Image (tube, rainbow, N blue to C red):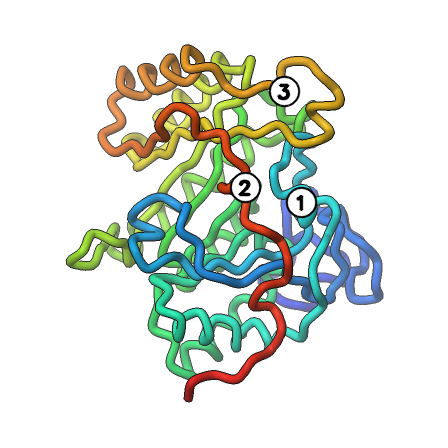
Amino acid sequence: MPERLLDATTLGACELCPRACGVNRLEGAVGACGSTDRLRLARAALHFWEEPPISGEAGSGTIFFSGCPLKCVYCQNHEISTGNFGLEVPPERLVEIMLELEDQGALNINLVTATHYAHLLPAALAEARRRGLSLPVVYNTSGYERVQAVRELGDLVDIWLTDFKYADAALGARLSHVADYPVVAAAALAQMVAELERRGGPSERADGTWLRGIIVRHLVLPGHADDSCRVLDLIWNTVGDVPISVMNQYTPNAAMRAAGGELARAVTDEEYERVLDHADDLGFSQMFWQEGGAVDESFTPPFDTTGVLSRPRNN
């Protein structure tokens, strides 16, 4: 294991994500994430559909990175996660985008699926801070992270917005092609909470939007309420009472509709209520949830490279 993981030189035998595929991304090889060493971005814009402390009224400044270490068969962002849609930009452009989003009034800089480009973040964020960036940084992740990467991001990330997808390893292998998801996600979550506590714990603005914090998200899948309940058990047993977000926005993509079966439909009210009730029974004191009928493709923004290309700043 390298002394520092978040360093561009480590891409010569890439181990940024838990897959540790070892390919030489520096010479153009494509990693398990679908990416070489060339930064690709799909969208950079204000987003209003995160949890209220993240989006508030002004919106979260989201930057969507192309590619993904996971290969979830039901992914709603499949155009960028497996299709790798996006534009190649130099790392310096990432700094400009952060500053532009702040100019637009964003409450934070929301890095969406940056795991496989995390080696760029220390330098990019340092330069953005030097040039005046004052917003908190949100690390929006699948939860499939290496503990060392989380530790090295600890002074850079203010808000951890992390998924916890599965408690059943076999389910993770079948739906996301990673058999070690539960153990990896639990270890990463524990480190995220430790980093937050080391920084002084949660903090918020006067209007209730967050400056520091953590939300653990779980998307309830149709036919898998049992595993959802076990996910909540695992979160509780790993880190105790943390803010959670239990989502029912599962929307079958074209591949799932064509395949048929349980993932071709939406989550039923009964399935969702069962998971919410279990969260209450466990004792979670802060829970975000979605009203019935939340299945809507509006939760998925258009991946049209908005905000990716350079444009002049106000100053």
Quarter of the image with the C terminus in it:
bottom left
Marks 2/3: CA–CA distance: 19 Å
**Residue highlighted by disc 2:** 142
Q: Residue furthest bottom?
A: 315
The residue carrying pointer 1 sits among few (fewer than 14), some (14 to 19) or many (20 or more) residues within 10 Å by Cα, namely many
For image coordinates 72% across by 54% down, the residue present is 85
Q: Is residue 44 above or below residue 286?
A: below
Q: Is residue 315 left or right of residue 181?
A: left
Q: Quadrant of residue 223?
A: top right
Specify the label residue 69 is tagged with. Answer: 1
Q: Nearer the viewer, residue 231 or 189?
A: 231
Q: Nearer the viewer, mark 2 or mark 3?
A: 3
**Residue highlighted by disc 3:** 263
**Tag 2: residue type?**
Ser
The residue carrying pointer 2 sits among few (fewer than 14), some (14 to 19) or many (20 or more) residues within 10 Å by Cα, namely many
Specify the label residue 105 is tagged with. Answer: none
The residue carrying pointer 3 sits among few (fewer than 14), some (14 to 19) or many (20 or more) residues within 10 Å by Cα, namely many
Q: Earlier in the sequence, mark 2 or mark 1?
A: 1
Q: Is residue 128 above or below residue 303?
A: below
Q: Nearer the viewer, residue 210 or 238?
A: 210
x then y, percent, for residue 214: 35, 45
For image coordinates 57% across by 30% down, the residue present is 251
x then y, percent, for residue 205: 20, 59
